[in-house]
Image (cartoon, rainbow, N blue to C red):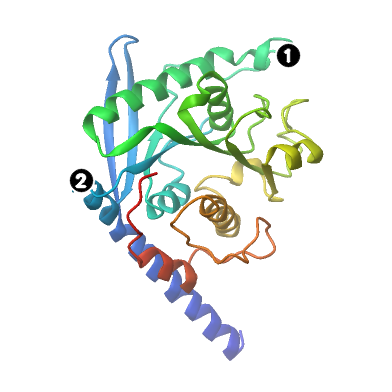
Amino acid sequence: MNRGLMIAFAVAVLLAAGYFSFSRWAVRHDSIALFDAARGRPIAVDVAVRRDSEMQAQAGLRVLPVAILNHGNTVKNTEYSFLANVLALRGYLVLSVQHDLPTDAPLVTKVGEPYVGRLPVYQRGVANILYVVDEMRKRLDYADYDKLLLVGHSNGGDISMFFAKEYPDLVKRIVTLDNLRVPFLTQAKFKILSFRSKDSNFVPDPGVVPDDEICARTGISLVKTGAQHTDMSDRGPDEVKARIQDALDQFLSEESDLRAVPDDRLLTGATTVPSESPERIRAATVVPRIAVH
């Protein structure tokens, strides 16, 4: 390795260390064990919230927006910290819901049935979200639980889309990472961002993803990541996660006072800022203006 590459590598390592150290200090993580007695079902929730935003909210100076993070099949709710931290740093109260239990039947595919036989799974996911929202409203009353940002990977993306279909008035925006079964809502009043994989083993069902013309007309943004379907969690490569973070950041900045990415960063994989970049670190350390979302 030549001297220039060695210096560049050393700088990247230092920047990454600075970003992740700041994230650990700035974002509070907590695990809460809930129990839905009506269904006899435990529901684990991982909470992520920016400490200074939470203090402002507790003082009555602002109301935090709420993001519900829904995991994919066989992936834990705690394996999306790369998304939870970005959302928390933007001032969101992030609730990552554990939808699956070891005692649940495995996810199956039944061609010809609604959502290939997964309707009960989506209905269970909706019930989980409603219960979590109701319980967290009692515990952390400084957030807006009436206009949710729904984020979900794979099966969690389908749960997010199905929830929005059933309860559109409770949704502000949707972000999915390669949902495959539940069709996009093309008549909705909220914006949708979806990251798509390039993976022959995980292909969306016909009619799920709208074509370019419908997307342009309805304001749906599709980001073709070129990544594998299973890369869209903490298990994936850092490069893939950084590109998703930056596109998500830009999507959120379009309607927010908390701008963390310059205006010239587009929703493409070609012009993204690495997650450990100085721009991101500087933006994250600025206390956001007080605003009610």
**Quick one: which residue is furthest to the bottom in this view?**
3
Residue at coordinates 34% horizontally, 45% vertically from top-left? 48
Secondary structure of the residue carrying numbered label 2:
helix
Q: Nearer the viewer, residue 165 or 177?
A: 165
- As drawn, the label of residue 74 is none
Picture quarter containing residue 195? top right
Q: Report the number of discs.
A: 2
Q: Earlier in the sequence, mark 2 or mark 1?
A: 2
Q: Where is mark 1, residue-wise?
A: 111
Q: Amino acid at mark 1?
A: Val
> Is 121 situated above or below 56?
above
Residue 253, horizontal then vertical, whole percent: 52, 54
Q: Amino acid at mark 2?
A: Gln
Query: Dot 2, crowdedness within 10 Å: few (<14), some or many (≥20)?
Result: some
Q: Nearer the viewer, residue 56 or 35?
A: 56
Query: Dot 1, crowdedness within 10 Å: few (<14), some or many (≥20)?
Result: few
Mark 2 or 1: in front is 2
Residue at coordinates 73% horizontally, 13% vertically from top-left? 111
Q: Where is mark 2, residue-wise?
A: 58
Q: Quadrant of the N terminus?
A: bottom right
